[in-house]
């Protein structure tokens, strides 16, 4: 698992609209990289919609917000349109980015074990280093799913 102070692994992928995205192009900006579990699920909808509801504060503070999950361009675009999400959703169909960030792990639900994305947000500074992590790991501040936008804004000291 990555830790605070580590250099964020580079990301080269596509957005939900098919545009090429490179994380290194955002050096000089703060980036909130939000790994969410799956498009069109209740928890992820609540999480990303709370960020959406507070998005103007991030945009006005020059903080780039990015959602990232498995799924296809079609499911990402549908999720984005259905929920009026203003920030890009990045593609990770093969889950290689989740794996490089250490958020693809064994999970357990209803007694069954399976592999999946663990809801985690990395806050990356202007130099490409991780300045905070919200997630399920030991010692991490847990993601408040329904209040995640507020939680991130508080970290950055933004007024909502």
Image (cartoon, helix red, strand yellow):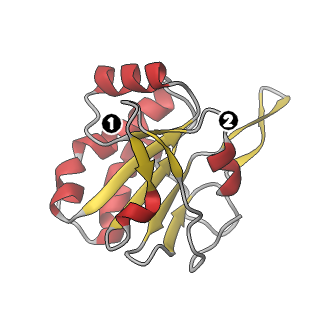
Mark 2 crowdedness (10 Å alpha carbons): few <14, some 14-19, many ≥20: few
Residue at (58% x, 36% y) in the render: 37
Q: Position of residue 96 (x, y in %)?
A: 68, 45
- Local SS, label 2: loop
Q: Going 38% across and 24% down the picture, which residue do you hit?
A: 77
136 vs 93: above or below: below
Numbered disc 1: secondary structure: helix
Drawn side of residue 57 relative to residue 142, left or right: left
Report the quarter where the N terminus lies: bottom right
Q: Position of residue 95 (x, y in %)?
A: 66, 40
Residue 57, quarter of picture: bottom left
Tell me if mark 1 has few (under 14), some (14-19) or many (20+) residues whose alpha carbon lies within 10 angstroms of its own: many
Left or right position of 119 against 26: right
- Report the front residue among 35 and 113: 35
Nearest the camera: 10 or 54? 10
Q: Contact, CB < 8 Å: mark 2 with mark 1?
A: no
Q: Which of marks 2 and 1 is nearer the N terminus?
A: 1
Q: Name the residue under label 1.
A: 49
What numbered label is drawn on residue 103? none
Relative to 127, say whether 74 is above or below: above
Q: How many marks?
A: 2
In the rendering, at what x and y percent does residue 40 appear?
47, 22
Mark 2 vs mark 1, CA separation in Å: 25 Å
* Residue 63, image quadrant: bottom left
- Quadrant position of the C terminus in the picture: bottom left
**x 52%, y 51%: residue:** 12
State the residue position of label 2: 94
Observer-nearest residue: 124 or 152? 124
């Amino acid at each position: 698992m990555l830790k605070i102070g580590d250099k964020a692994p580079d990301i080269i992928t596509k957005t939900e609209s098919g545009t090429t995205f490179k994380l290194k192009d955002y050096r000089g900006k703060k980036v909130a990289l939000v790994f969410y579990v799956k498009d069109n699920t209740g928890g992820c909808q609540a999480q990303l919609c709370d960020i959406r509801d507070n998005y103007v504060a991030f945009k006005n503070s020059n903080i780039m917000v990015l959602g990232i999950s498995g799924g296809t361009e079609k499911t990402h675009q549908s999720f984005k349109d259905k929920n009026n999400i203003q920030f890009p959703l990045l593609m990770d169909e093969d889950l290689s980015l989740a794996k490089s960030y250490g958020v693809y792990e064994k999970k357990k639900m209803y007694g069954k074990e399976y592999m999946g994305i663990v809801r985690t947000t990395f806050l990356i500074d202007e130099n490409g280093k991780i300045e905070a992590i919200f997630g399920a790991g030991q010692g991490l501040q847990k993601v408040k799913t329904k209040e995640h936008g507020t939680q991130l804004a508080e970290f950055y000291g933004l007024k909502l």
